[in-house]
Image (cartoon, rainbow, N blue to C red):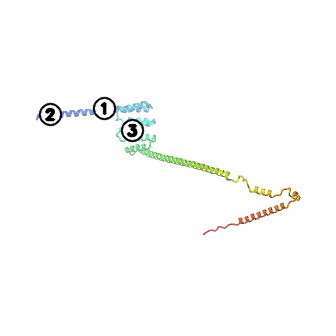
C-alpha cells in the first residue's frame, strides 16, 4: 500500500515538473515574441522618422527590418505600403497592404488595409477588384463614409467600363458587318461584270457569224444575168441599124425642142408624181384620225 502511494506521488511529481517546464517554455516563447515585437516597433518608429525626413531609402530599409523582426507587427507593412503608394509604386504598395490586412486580427486595421487596397485597384483601373476591396473594408467598419463613397465611385466606373466595352463590341460587329456587305457587293459586281463580258462575247460571235452569212448569201454579190442587162440586149436587138433609118430620124432634136417620145415621158412622169402626192395626202388623212379606246367596265 505504501509502495502504491509512493509511485503515485512520483508520477504526480513528474507530471508537475513537465507542466512547469512546458509553461516555462511557453513563457520564454512569449517573452521572445514580445521582445521581437518591441524591436520591430522600435525599427518602425525609426523608419517613420526617416520617411518624415524624406529619406525614403533608409526608411524602406528600416521598415523591411521591422517586418522581418516580427510578423505580429502589422503597422510596418502598412506604413511601407503607404510609402510605396505615395511614390506611385502601386504594385509594391498593394503587396504590403495585403500583408497587413491578412496578418492583423483587429477590425480597424483590416478596414484601413482593405480600403487602401481598393485605392490601389482604382489607380490601376481594376474597378471590379476595387469594388470587392471596398466591400471587405466596409465589413470591418460599416460607418466609414469615405470608404462608402469610394465604393460608389468604383461601381460607377465599372458600369462605364462595361458600357464602353459593349459599345466597342457593337462597333466592331457593325464594322465587320459593313466589311462583309462591301465584300458581297464587290463580289456581285465582279460576277455581273463577268456575265456582261460573256454576253458581249456571245453577241460579237453572233454578229461575226451574221456577217459571214451575209458575205455568202448577201445582196452585194453581182448576178451574171440581171434583168437590166437582158432588157438592154433585147432593146439593142430591136433597134434597127443606123444605116436602115430614114434621113429624118437620123436628125437629132434641137436643144430647145423636145421629141414626141420625150414629151410623152415627161407627161407620164408628171402623172406619176401627182399620183404619189395624192397617195401621201390620203395617208396623212388616215393617220390623223384619233383612235378611241374602249374600256370594259
Name the residue carrying label 1.
32
- As measured in the structure, the alpha-carbon distance from the residue carrying label 2 to the one carrying label 1 is 37 Å
From the image, state whether disc 2 or disc 1 is nearer to you.
2
Residue 235, image x, y percentages: 79, 58
Q: Find the residue positioned furthest to the left.
A: 1
Mark 3 crowdedness (10 Å alpha carbons): few <14, some 14-19, many ≥20: some
Q: Nearer the viewer, residue 16 or 182?
A: 182
Q: Position of residue 293 (x, y in %)?
A: 65, 67
In the rendered image of this protein, does residue 242 appear above or below residue 165?
below
Q: Quadrant of the N terminus?
A: top left
Q: Are marks 2 and 1 in contact (CB under 8 Å)?
A: no
Local SS, label 2? helix
* Residue under the point 43% across and 32% down: 51
The residue that disc 2 covers is 7
Q: Secondary structure at mark 1?
A: helix
Q: Quadrant of residue 283?
A: bottom right
Q: Which mark is residue 98?
A: 3
Question: Would you say the residues marked 1 and 3 are in contact, meaning their CB atoms lie under 8 Å apart?
Answer: no
User: Residue 273 falls in which quadrant of the image?
Assistant: bottom right
Amino acid at each position: 500500500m505504501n509502495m502504491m502511494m509512493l509511485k503515485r506521488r512520483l508520477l504526480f511529481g513528474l507530471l508537475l515538473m513537465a507542466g512547469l517546464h512546458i509553461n516555462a517554455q511557453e513563457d520564454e516563447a512569449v517573452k521572445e515574441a514580445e521582445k521581437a515585437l518591441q524591436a520591430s516597433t522600435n525599427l518602425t518608429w525609426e523608419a517613420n522618422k526617416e520617411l518624415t525626413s524624406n529619406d525614403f531609402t533608409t526608411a524602406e530599409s528600416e521598415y523591411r527590418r521591422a517586418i522581418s523582426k516580427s510578423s505580429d507587427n502589422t503597422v510596418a507593412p502598412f506604413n511601407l505600403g503607404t510609402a510605396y503608394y505615395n511614390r506611385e509604386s502601386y504594385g509594391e504598395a498593394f503587396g504590403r497592404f495585403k500583408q497587413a490586412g491578412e496578418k492583423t486580427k483587429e477590425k480597424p486595421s483590416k478596414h484601413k488595409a482593405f480600403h487602401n487596397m481598393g485605392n490601389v485597384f482604382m489607380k490601376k483601373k481594376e474597378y471590379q477588384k476595387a469594388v470587392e476591396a471596398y466591400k471587405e473594408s466596409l465589413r470591418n467598419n460599416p460607418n466609414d463614409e469615405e470608404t462608402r463613397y469610394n465604393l460608389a465611385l468604383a461601381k460607377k466606373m465599372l458600369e462605364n467600363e462595361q458600357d464602353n466595352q459593349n459599345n466597342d463590341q457593337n462597333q466592331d460587329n457593325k464594322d465587320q458587318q459593313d466589311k462583309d456587305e462591301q465584300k458581297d457587293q464587290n463580289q456581285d459586281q465582279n460576277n455581273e461584270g463577268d456575265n456582261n463580258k460573256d454576253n458581249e462575247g456571245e453577241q460579237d460571235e453572233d454578229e461575226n457569224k451574221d456577217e459571214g452569212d451575209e458575205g455568202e448569201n448577201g445582196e452585194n454579190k453581182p448576178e451574171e444575168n440581171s434583168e437590166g442587162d437582158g432588157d438592154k440586149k433585147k432593146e439593142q436587138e430591136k433597134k434597127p441599124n443606123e444605116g436602115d433609118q430614114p434621113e429624118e430620124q437620123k436628125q437629132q432634136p434641137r436643144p430647145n425642142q423636145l421629141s414626141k417620145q420625150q414629151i410623152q415621158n415627161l407627161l407620164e412622169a408628171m402623172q406619176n408624181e401627182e399620183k404619189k402626192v395624192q397617195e401621201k395626202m390620203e395617208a396623212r388623212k388616215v393617220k390623223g384620225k384619233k383612235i378611241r379606246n374602249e374600256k370594259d367596265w
